[in-house]
Amino acid sequence: MKKALIRFSFFILLIIPSLNLKSQITTGELSGEVNTITSAVPFLMITPDSRAGGMGDAGVATSPDAASLHWNAAKLSFIDEDYGASLSYTPWLRALIDDISLSYLSGFKKLKNGQVLGLSLRYFSLGNITFTDISGTTLRDFRPNEFSLSASYSMLFSKNLSGGIALKYIYSNLTGGIQSGNVETHPGNAVAGDISLYYTKAIKIAGNNSNMSFGINISNIGNKISYTDDSESNFLPTNLRLGGALTYEFDQYNALTYSMDINKLLIPTPPVYDGEGTAPENIVDGMDPDVSVPAGMWQSFYDAPGGTQEELRELTYSFGLEYWYDKKFALRTGYFHEHETKGNRKYATVGLGLKLNVFQLDFAYLLPVQQRNPLENTLRFSLLFNFKALKKVSSENNSEIKDK
């Protein structure tokens, strides 16, 4: 019974923003209190891969790999392999519910002159939900799910700078088309895009080989999404991510990377209402959030009711360290910080990586700072494939057979 209540509460938290039920914040509640920004399809913001998951969710400027499309498609232009793929799996919120998970499949193919195509599929399963009528009679069981399908193109602008774009289709089915009262629901659909840049340069530090990188990615720029014909549409989690990374090679066997990402949601901040309603005339501080997507992106930089101080609170920070030994074994750690009034997610992460000729296996574990955090014990598993190496191994084996 307790698990069912938790599952239902989590489902309500997902569906409320999608049905556009505006929370009313009064002036008495604003000072130092919670004023979180919510959006539809928040699964798009969950870290899908174990490498970044072990580095505090930092990934916009780290070295490229097969999972780079989520973080910065432009990075793929600097990847060494000609083609590759990755598969990641994350059991989500296992401290509360045991059947929610995120799966992520991604791949890339080099063309020529630094041009690279990327593809990814993200699938989020919300487990099983039992719908009942007002008297508690079971109507049916349903497994809510969401997915996004992305394609990217990146190219070199110079030997140190690249750019990337990505297009994605987003599908979100939270209700299975069930009718609630007189309101008919339907799956939400949206189309969005990402724009990214990546700069990387080899440098010397204390005479040793090093590398510095910078990245920026504006993701999920797309139309609003709705789950009913009667309610207003809601913003996608349009996000600005920028950061840097510095890799220092102690010698030919040991290398350490430090990375940092800063994030800001580019959607309106909830205003303060007078308690009499949520119409524009009821706003006493802040700005009307019912605007277009471009206006909402621009407005997000100055619309917080608490002014500049609250705007700064809307930034989240990711810090990560990655140590490689002989380019075969990796240790990772990181920290993610979000202000108390904007969600209060604070957690440390640790991770491991093992790179063999054909594949790389990564593992990440989340350690919440707060006691009894719903994200505690979050595990991530990733498997990256190097098909070029696989082809090489196959050719070598064939040569050995012929020699015999």
Image (cartoon, rainbow, N blue to C red):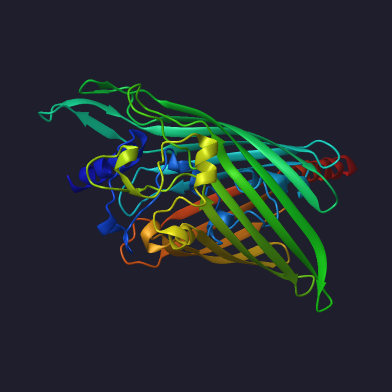
Left or right relative to 387: residue 367? left
Direction from residue 20 to residue 157 in the image, left or right: right
- x and y percentages locating residue 181 in the rendered image: 20, 23
Quadrant in the picture for the N terminus: top left
Give percent across and percent down for residue 172.
Answer: 43, 31
Answer yes or no: is residue 80 visible.
no
Eyeballing the image, is 283 above or below 367? above
Total label count? 0
Q: Residue at x 88, y 40 (%)?
A: 402
Asked whether 154 or 95 is in front, the reply is: 154
Q: Position of residue 91 (x, y in %)?
A: 42, 48
Kindly give the residue lying farthest to the bottom in the view shown: 206
Residue 184 visible in the current orientation: yes
Query: Could you say which quadrant of the image residue 87 lies in?
Result: top right
Front position in the image: 310 or 7: 310
Residue 258 in the figure: left or right of residue 265:
right
**Is residue 42 or residue 122 the one in the foreground?**
42
Residue at image location 64% in from the left, 43% down from the top: 69
Residue drawn at the location 49% of the way across and 61% of the way down: 312
